[in-house]
Image (cartoon, rainbow, N blue to C red):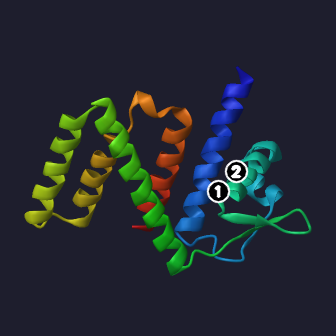
Amino acid sequence: MQPLEMKQLKEQIVKYIRAKILKGEYPEGFELVQENIASELGVSRMPVREALQILEQEGYIERMRNRHMRVVGLSRDSIKAHGRLLSAMTSEIAVMMIECHYGMAQLKNAYHTLRAAVQSGAGHETLLKLEKDVHKQFYFDGLGTFVVQQYERMLTSFWMLA
């Protein structure tokens, strides 16, 4: 049972650090020190180290010579590229849904609800929630766990930037 708890803890730490980076609380060039983060969160260094490795693979941070990590900046171009990749991935998943005849009615309903809210001048928070509802329709069994996780990470990052 311990490995499952450690995995969940690692994912929570990843989400915590990613959110701080995306909100600018850990700005470009900010040095991430395992010991400091572990102390701040009241956890051991091991899940922090694993979380930092994941964030390095995702491109949010880079390894320094002293084994510490540094936040990579989010430029306007990188944010634009992120949006384009998310759009391409969403389009491909939609094609897969059509090919599998999966969930099109739910997707259409979510889309029409969002469209009506836009036309009625709904607020930012409402529109963001409805957009998330549209994207949630793209999760289906035929995708596989890996694709769903990657898509979810891209969406989460994008919404934090919105």
The image quadrant of residue 9 is: top right
- Label 2, secondary structure: give it: helix
Q: Are marks 2 and 1 in contact (CB under 8 Å)?
A: yes
Given residues 18 and 146, the one toward you in this image is: 146
Q: How crowded is mark 1: few (under 14 residues within 10 Å), some or many (20 or more)?
A: some
Furthest residue in direction left, as rendered: 120
- Disc 2 from disc 1: Cα separation: 6 Å
| Residue 159 visible in the current orientation | yes
Percent across and percent down for residue 90 are 38, 51
Task: Write the residue at 49% across / 65% down.
Answer: 82
- Residue 116 sits in quarter: bottom left
Q: Is residue 54 left or right of residue 25?
A: right
Residue at numbered disc 2: 54
Residue that numbered label 1 is attached to: 58
Side of 87 relative to 64 (left or right): left
**47 and 162: which one is in front?**
162
